[in-house]
Image: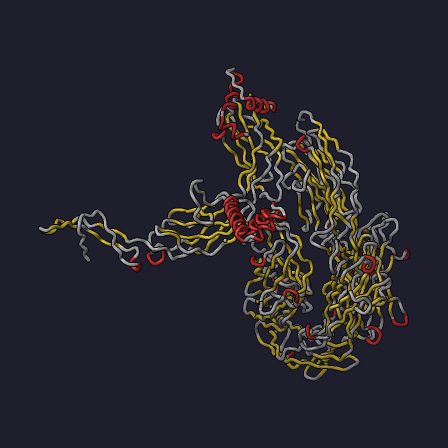
Amino acid sequence: MTWKRPAGGPRSVEILGARARRSWYTSGSRETTDLERSQFVWHGTGETLLTSLQYWTPGRDYNDSSGVIVYTYSADHGYRWEVDEPSNENGYICELPEEEAYRILQDNRDYDYGLERIDLNLLERGPYFVSQPHSTVIVGDPPSIEVECVASGNPEPIYSWMKGKDFDVKLTPELDPRYTITNGKLRIENPVIQKDSGLYRCRVENKFGVIVGHVIRLTFGDIGEFSNVPDAPVNAKAYEGAAIDCSKISYKPAVQYNWYKHTALQFIRPEFQPYMFISRNGKLYFTEVTTADEGSYHCLAMLTGVNRYTIGTDQPPTRTSMPIRLHVHDQAPKADWGPEIQDEFIAVFPKPPLAGQDVHLECFAYGTATSQFVYSWKREGKELPKNSHQLDHNRVLVLTEATLDDQGVYTCSVSRGTSSRDSKSIYLKLGAKPYFLLPIGNQHADFGSQLTWRCDARANPAASFRWLRNGRPLTSDPDQGIRVINNVLVIKKLDPAKHDGMYQCEASNNQGTSLSEGQLRVLKFPPNFNKYPMNRNIRASANGNLTLHCRPEGAPLPVIRWFLNGAELPVSSSKVMQLPGGHLRLLFVTQSDVGEYRCRAENFLGAAEDRTIITVEPGTHISISPADETVTVNNTVFLPCTASHAPDADMIYSWRFNGFLLDPKRHPEYKIIQETGIGRTGMYIRLATLKHQGHYVCEALTPLSADRKGAWLTVKGPPSEPAGVYADTPTTGNSSVVIRWTDGSDNGAAISRYIIEAANAYEGDTWEIAIADLKHVDTLAEEDTTNSVKVSGLNPGCGYRFRVISVNAYGRSPPSRPSRSLLEYQLSFPQKKLLGRHDHHVELVGVENYYLEYEFKVQAFNDLGYGPNSTVVTIMSAEDLPIAIPTNVYADGYNGSAMEVTWTPVPQTREYAKGKILGYQVFGLLLLLLLLLVLFFGAHMTLCSCEIRKTLYSNNKVLLLLLLVVVVEVVVMGVWLCRSINYWHEEEVATDYKEFIRHEGQIDMGIVIGLKSDNFYFFTIQVYNSAGLGPISEYFFQETLHAPAFKYPEDVRVSSAGGHAVEVWWRGVHITQPEANVYGYVIYYWPANEHYRTASHLIVYNHLTYHAQIHVDPGVVYALRVSAYSVGGYGKKSRTTYFTLEGRNVLVDYRLAQTVEAFRSAAITSSISVLSLIVWLTMSTPFSLIVS
C-alpha cells in the first residue's frame, strides 16, 4: 500500500468534488538528484512515467524540477500535474491496485493472526537481525579481533560467516584454526593483513529461511614514517597570523595530529592557548604570533579510524616529525586588526564527508589576539542539527553520525568586540550509504491474493535495488508470478509452496550496501472468532443508532453475512446497512430490532459464526467498547467506542487516560472521532510512545445519561533508561574502572545490548562512546543483581562520568542519568603523717586511679598539737596513656605541597582519653622509603672495588657497620623527602624514625606542609595527653596534588580601557603532566615606589580568559605581574611590566624593566629625581628578593 495520487490521469480525481480545491501529493519524483539524466518515477510501483500518460499543466517546463509531482486544480485545466517541494503541507490519497483492495479493510496482521491472544515471543517465526557489525579498521597489532551479528527467531537461528568474491567461502576452524565462531561472533586470532583484510558477511537461517547481513570490510590501518630530512623553517612576522605545516606522511585510513614545542613536556593545548589551533589537516595555526612563539615544533601523527568502529591497542602507532623551526621576526605591535577567516576555512573533514560518520566543520581567523574571538555557527533556514555540538572555543562544529537531513548551508561567524566581524558560508553535501526510512516489514498475506512489496531507501548518490529470497537474488519470473521493478516486488496468486520464505531488499551505491529483511507468510485457514468474539449482550438506546462489529480472522479474507433470529438480514435498506468492513449499522433502533444477531464469516476453507442479543432501552449505552490493545512505539492505534443514544439528544465522546481527562488541543497525538455516519467512532493515538501506555476510558455523554467503558493499552518499544549508574571506586585502575547499573523496563522486548558513554572533566557534557556494542550477557555476573562492565582506555588522572543506553529490538533507551564523577586520583597511610620538714610529697594512688580528682590540705603539727588547716586544693592524679584511636582518617589535597588531614576526634572522657587531650599527632611516610634503601645499598656497593667488596662480604662486622651507615642515611634521606611534617633543631636528636606534626587541642583536622607534589604518602593519627601518645590509627593512603604552574604567563600587554581603567592581556600558560589544571589567573599590581607586599590583586576565575580590566590612578607608575592558579597553588609570576596612565593613554616602556634589572645588578644608587624610583627599587632588598 502506498500513499499517492493515481497515475492514471485527472479523470479519477473527479470524486473529490469541489471541496478538494487543493494540491495532493503523489509518489512521483526524480529517481536521482541528477536532473539531466534522471526521469520521474512512480515510487509506489517502481514504474517510470509514460509519455502518453502525462498530464502536466500546459505552458511550464519541468525538466529542471526536482520536487514531488502533485495534483493541483485550476479553473482553466482542472486537475493537472505540477511539481511542489516535499516540505510543503499537502494532502495525500491512498491508492493501490484493485487486486489488493482487500488490504484497506483488513486489520494489521502479525504472527498471531488467526490465533487466540498469545505472547508473540512464543510463536515461531523466521530470523531477523537485532544488530549487525560495521566495517572496521584494525589499528596497531591487537592479539585478536571480533565482529558480531546478533539475530533472533524461533527456532533459534544458526549463524555462519562467509568470505570471498561471491561470499561462497564459509569460515570454520577447520578452514583456519585462528577462526572461532560463537553464535554470531567471529573471532580471528593474530590477524594479519594478507589473510584477513577483505569483505565479510554474516548468514543466519532457521527452518523458515535464510537472511544475509550487511557486507563489512576489515581494513588494516597503516602509517609510514616522517622524513629524516627536516622541513624548511617557517618565517613569520610578529603580531601577524601564521601556520606551520606538518611534515608529509603516508597513512591509511586516517590520523590524528598533535603538536609539541621543544620537548614532549610542552604539548600544544588549544583549550588553554586559544590563539593556537590544530586542524584535522595537520596544520598548527596561530591567530597572532610573537617572539615568545619562536622555537622548534614537532608534529605527531597517531593512526586512527574514521569513526568509532576501530579495533586496536590503547597506544596506537604514532610518529613524531623532525623539528620544524618557527622564526618570528620582531616588529612593533600592530593596531587592532581582524578577525579575518583564512582562505582554507571553512574546512570539512573527512574528505569526502559521508553520512554515518562524525563530520567536522572547522573555522579559524587571524587577527589581534588581545581581544577574545567569539565564534558561532548557524544553518540557513533551519536550526543546527540536534546531533551537533561545538568544540575548541566553538571553532569546530561536529555533526555526530551525520545524516542526509544535516545537509545545507552552514555559516561560521567570528567577532572581536562589537565592531569587528567576519563570516563565511559553505554548502555541506554528504555522500551516504543507503539507509532505509522504514524496514520492509513482515507480510502475512492471503492465499491467492496479490502482494506489492516496496522498499524505500535514501542514499547519495541514488541507490540501485535488488531483491533476495532466502539469501539468493530474485528476478522477475512470470511462471512464479514474480515481477521485480527496481525497488518494488509484485507477487501474484500467492502460494505458500512457492512464495513463503525470507525476503530482503538490498540497496547499493558506491558508498556501500544496506539490507532490510522481512518474512512472507501466505496464510490459508478457515475463519474464526478466537481473538475478537462479539459481546454476548448489547443494549441499544431507543430510536438511537447502533453499530455491531464483526471481526473474524481468516485467509483468504472471509465474506460476511448477517442473520436476525435465524433469517438472513437484508443489508441494503435505509434502516440497515453493512459497512465495507463487514460491520452492521442499524438506524433508529426500535423494539422491532430486538433479537439475536448472527454474523457468519465464510471462505472456501470453511465458515464460522458468532452471535449477540440486542435489547432496546432508554438512555445511552456503549455498544462497541474499546478492547485491550498492543501497539509498537511510533505506530498508530485505534480504540473503538460506539454508543447508542436517543436521536433527539446530543451526544459527545470524551476520553480519560489514567483518570485524567484528555484534551486533544493540548495533546494533538490524540484524535477523537465523533459520530461519522458510518459507525467508525473512537480515538486514534498517533505516534504512540511509552508514555501513552495505560488505562483508557471512553465516556459517551448526553444531557440525560452517560455510559463508560475502558481498556488497557500496552506500548512496546525501546527500553526505559537504566538506573543507578555508578563507578565502582575500588576497581579504579590507571586507565580503567568497573561501572554498574540496574536495567529499566524492557518494554516488551528483551534488552540485547548496551552502549556505554563517558564524559571527562575537561569537556563537560561532551559525551563520547566508550563501548559501542556491549552484549547483555557480558554484563551479568553470578549472585549479582546489577549489570557491570569494565571500561578501559580512559586517560589516567582524569575525572569521568558515565551513562548507559539500553538497546532492544525496538531501539535505544534514553541515556541514563550520569554517574557521579569518578575522582581524579585513586585514594590509595586517708591521712598520712610526714615526719620532718618537707615542702612536697608524692602519693601513689595506683594505676586504676589515674586522672581522678583528689582534695588535699596540709596541716603542721608538733608536740603541742596540730596547727590550722591549709585551704583545700583539688589535684588531678597523673594521666595514663590514651587508649582511644582516632577514626575515619582521611587526607585530601590542600595544594601541591600540603595535605589537609581530617579524622573523627576521640571522646574527651576519662575512659578513652585517660586524661586531658592536648592534641593530635599526624605522621606521614613517603612511599619511596623502601626503594631508597635498595638504591642506597646498591650505591655503596657500586662505589667499592671488587676486592673491597670481597673483603666486606667476608667480614661480617664490617658489613654490618656498612649496613648501619646505609640505614642511617636512608632515615636522614627519608626525613628530607617527607620534609614536611615535623622539624627539629640541628643540635637535637630525633627520637623516632617517623616524621610528625602535632596539632594542639580537641580538633578534627590539620594541615601537613612541605610534601612533594604528585607523590603518595601514608598518614596516621595519634591522640596524646601529658602521659604520651595513644595507639596509632589505621593508615590512610593518599596522593598529593599536582604542582602549581611551572611557567609564567608571557607577552603581558597593557592598554587603555577608558576612564581610569586599563585592559591587561596575556598569553595563558602551558601545563605539563606534573602540573595541576589551571583554574584561572591572578593579576598583581602596585605603585612601583611601594613594596610588592602592598600589591592589589584581581582574580580571573576562568582559565580560558586571558584579559581583564583594572582601575588605576593617572600619573602613577605601576608594576604588574600575572600568575596562574590551580589546586596546586599559585604558579610562577610573569616578568614585571611597568606602565602609567596619562590622560587616555597608557604608556608602557618595555625597556624600563630592563633598566631596572640593570641597575639592580650593578647595585647603583643615585639621588637624581628622575631615577629615584628605580634606585629605590634597586636598593630595596625585600623587593629584589620578590621580583627576582
Looking at the rendered image, the quarter that the C terminus falls into is: top right
Most distant residue in the bottom direction: 566
Q: Residue 423: in sight, yes or no?
A: yes
Q: Residue 637: in sight, yes or no?
A: no
Image location (x, y in percent) of residue 11: 83, 59
Image location (x, y in percent) of residue 581: 73, 72
Displayed quadrant of residue 676: bottom right
Displayed quadrant of residue 743: bottom right
Which is more toward the observer, 2 or 317?
Answer: 317
Which is more toward the observer, 546 or 1145?
Answer: 1145
Looking at the rendered image, the quarter that the N terminus falls into is: bottom right
Which is more toward the observer, 202 or 669?
Answer: 202
Most distant residue in the left direction: 864
Q: Is residue 465 left or right of residue 363?
A: right
Q: Residue at x 57, y 72 (%)?
A: 619
Image location (x, y in percent) of residue 812: 66, 60
Q: Is residue 982 left or right of residue 126?
A: left
